[in-house]
Image: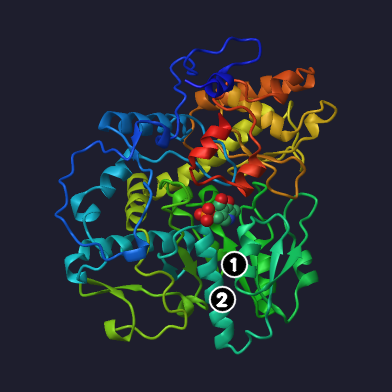
Amino acid sequence: MTEMTTKFFAKAGEPGTHTGNRGLQIEEPLIFEIGALETSGVDFEEPEPFESRLGDMERRDAIGLPGLTEPEAVRHYVRLSQKNYSIDSGIFPLGSCTMKHNPRLNEKMARLPGIGDIHPLQPQETVQGAIELMAMLSDWLLKLTGMPAVALSPKAGAHGELCGMIAIRAALEARGEAEQRRVVLVPDSAHGTNPATAALLGFQVRAVAAKSDGTVCAQAVRDVLGPDVAAMMITNPNTCGLFEPEIADIAAILHEAGAYLYCDGANFNAIAGKVRPGDLGVDAMHINLHKTFSTPHGGGGPGAGPVVFSESLAPFAPLPLIREENGEFALVEDHATGGEDRPFGRLVAFHGQMGMFVRALSYMLSFGIDGVRQASEDAVLNANYIRAGLKDVMTQPFGDRVCMHEVLFDDVFLKGTGLSTLDFAKAMIDEGFHPMTVYFPLVVHGAMLIEPTESESKQSLDQFVGALRSLARAARQGDTERFKGAPHFAPRRRLDETRAARQPVLRFTPAQSKAAD
Ligand SMILES: Cc1ncc(COP(=O)(O)O)c(C=O)c1O
């Protein structure tokens, strides 16, 4: 074992170990550093002699693939998986992310042979059950949102935003106003994907200032509204964990001015079963199935972000449409399959993430509508339990007020301690907790956004609150060492996260591993 690993695991003032391992935590090398390169863990038959047609293109050097036996490969990936904190290991309090429990029932349903083994190119008469399942999911989403049309195909929340805004652009084109309406209004508390979506479609983004209580008022919208506005994108409940109380008025003002209201529905898990966005005047809204309806987030996917549409935008939703006639289900694609031509066309090659549809519907059916409503209430209750447990030791940017599914703190309680939000978050890792979302929303200095979700028990919340109370007290008492070097007990200490994100090393070269040694 190299000195490098010993160095990483030794804490200040403590001896390192001979192996570099610590307790039963194994310091795992890269797969290229285990076993022998250019060997194989299985016996392949020698290929028949053949004449290469690659000419100059033929590889001259060894490719450098790692050769592992089966047990070596299994151990490598199991050890890596153990380093990966997950919702199955403990509370994952990332605000705006809704890391809730993924019920095992969902997994069982998604693996049923009649669902897991089908292919999107199968003739529709052989997958009637799957299309019926999509129709049922659509029905749930439409009833929960109070909207008349839905597109299931977007693959994530951000993709849903793109879908909704393309539909808005298509509707404006149909009205002959696309050239005139080039501006999208976005509150300054918005999730970054909102202005990014608008900009990607060539709209100019005009900010709407939030009030001092973190919400957007109708007057602020009126102040920036003009004949050039295509739509407003607003998140509700917003990224400060607050319900937008003037949203219905905002919708009315926008409609009067000929513009649309896009609602970022990423936080629908706070209001599902309680509030129908259609009743608020929303024209399009995405729903992150991987948040509200408990499907796994995955590493950037697979997600699903269905979009619901109002009456006025329904004709501009993307294909395919789901249709039922005399008990027969069909995915209607175009003229050839009995549909009308649609200005949008399709968003994706097939029809979306079937595995996620199954999981979300499984969650809905196992809970029932009253259960979905209770999940929303419990998510809000849990966030407020944390707020009440921490309000005397941490500070809130808009004063102590009832929040929705997530509670927002700022860094005012750290003032004079020499510590930052990042130090506080890193010290949580030593306590065995994944940090909350930090420095978001941008409108709050040193923001700490905590979303426990409905999955957590009172005992789990009490442990979490207890740890944060102890950290807040330690910070006030000047125990800076506990924070500045944190995490002290993780396999890696404080990393340069900005550099890791901006200059990621994604390619292994033997020279690099030497340099690191
Ligand atoms: C408020 C908000 N909007 C949009 C998104 C984007 O959703 P997705 O990650 O599914 O693309 C997120 C995700 O965190 C979010 O919190």
Q: Can residue 424 be seen in this view?
A: yes
Residues marked 2 and 1 touching at CB (< 8 Å) = yes
Label 2 and label 1: CA atoms lie apart by 9 Å
- Tell which circle, 2 or 1, labels the residue nearer the N-terminal end: 2
Q: Quadrant of residue 354?
A: bottom left
- Residue 396, image x, y percentages: 74, 38
Q: Position of residue 69 (x, y in %)?
A: 27, 32
Q: Quadrant of residue 192?
A: bottom right
Please give the name of the residue rendered at 34% of the width and 50% of the height, measured from the top-left corner: 359
| Residue located at (41% from left, 53% from top) | 302
The number of discs equals 2
Query: Where 43 sits versus 267, above or below?
Result: above
Q: Is residue 125 left or right of residue 94?
A: left
> SS at mark 2?
helix
**Kind of residue at badge 2:** Ile
x%, y% of residue 391? 71, 30
Per the rendering, the mark at residue 262 is 1
Is residue 278 shown to the viewer in this render?
Answer: no
Residue appearing at x 75%, y 45% in the figure = 444
* Residue 168: numbered disc: 2
Look at label 1 and name its amino acid. Tyr
Ligand 1: give its quadrant.
Answer: bottom right
